[in-house]
Image (spheres, rainbow, N blue to C red):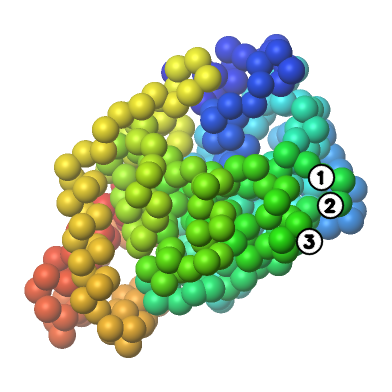
Amino acid sequence: MNIIDYIKKNKDKTFKEYPFNEIDNLIFSLLTYIDFTKIVPAFKQGKITLKEAAQKLSEKKKNYRGMFIGNTFKMFQIMKDTKRYQDTLLYNYMKVVNDDMQFGAMTMKLPDKSIYISFAGTDTSIIGWEEDFKMTYLYPGASQKYASIYLNKAVGLLDRNIRVGGHSKGGNLAICAVMNARVWIRKKVIKITNFDGPGFLKSEIESKAYKKIEPKIKMVVPKESIIGMLLYNTPDYTVIKSKGLNIFQHDAFNWQCKNKELVRDNQSKRSKALQKKLTKKLEELSLKERINLVKNLFDIFRNNNIKDTKEIKIRQIFKLMKEFKKLDKETQNLLAELLMIIFIK
């Protein structure tokens, strides 16, 4: 059973009858993959029910980007006809895509009166992925700054039982937003969930700001996690079962559910090994070397006029790697492995 099966099975159960659980958490974290421009109101422009938003969305041309957007759209249309989800209020929608970042966020008020704030994960744009790689040397990045501003602006004085979450990069942004939120807002947040998102630099993980909110953080990764093993994250994470292969382990629609929980699993040797290699290499590289590595990698994409990861083929990976001759063999091999895993579907 995946999350769509879960929605169909529990469509007539209210949140009073069947309280909010980790599968609902995942479902709401994914909704920001959808482009709600001119459908969900922006700040101080009102609210719209999930059912109304889905009806309006179905009338628009489905011109969306993202590895998981097709299933997210399908899931959203199913949610509109359920007693459980259809009356959820959507508002404070924000989407920004420019030369520096790809950012999205939305606030939701559930029928049980709790608040869910979701941050969007990385889409298939090269800009989005470049921003992720910049996390190896830059904090806060453009999206991380926006996440903090967004949360401070989105939470009202009367809001309570606030959950903040996101899938992929959205999980990182959820943590970052609460880390830098006003004190009274941090106190209102009861849970922060990072669904297989990248971590932070070591200095941020060890910071007072992170330590203050760490008890509220929950991290969930699939057995063969790749994205969630990037940078430093909480060592206490939950491993769950995914039916996907390679990067499609990261696709939340492949994650398996049972009753009110995601099915538990054990992290694979491959995932653990990749985590160790990435951590070791990150610690070996100086700040200047990290900056140059990321700059050189994405300059290659730009020089080859690659604007979207969907355009990358296996033969291009080898072509790209030929331009890294100045790097040591270990770094070349690690980059090749990462590029193959992430960009080749």
Q: Which residue is mark 2?
A: 156
Q: Secondary structure at mark 2?
A: loop
Amino acid carrying label 1: it is Asp
Q: CA distance from mark 2 to mark 1?
A: 5 Å
Quarter of the image holding residue 331? bottom left
Amino acid carrying label 3: it is Lys
Identity of the residue drawn at 16% across and 81% down:
327
Pinpoint residue 313: horizontal percent, then vertical percent. 28, 57
Q: Does 337 sit left or right of 44 as displayed?
A: left
Q: Which residue is mark 1?
A: 159
Does residue 99 sit above or below 222 in this rendering? Answer: below
Image quadrant occupied by the N terminus = top left
Q: Does 270 sit left or right of 88 as displayed?
A: left
Furthest residue to the left? Answer: 329
Mark 2 neighbour class, 10 Å CA radius: few under 14, some 14 to 19, many 20 or more: few
Quarter of the image holding residue 297? bottom left
Identity of the residue drawn at 52% across and 47% down:
215
Amino acid carrying label 2: it is Gly
Identity of the residue drawn at 26% across and 33% down:
266
Does residue 317 sit above or below 196 in this rendering? Answer: below
Q: CA distance from mark 3 to mark 2?
A: 8 Å
Q: Which residue is mark 3?
A: 153
Pinpoint residue 134: horizontal percent, then vertical percent. 42, 73
Residue 300 visible in the shown view: no
1 or 3: tag closer to the N-terminus: 3
Does residue 196 sit above or below 211 in this rendering? Answer: above
Residue 152 visible in the shown view: yes
Confirm or deny contact between disc 2 and disc 1 (CB under 8 A): yes
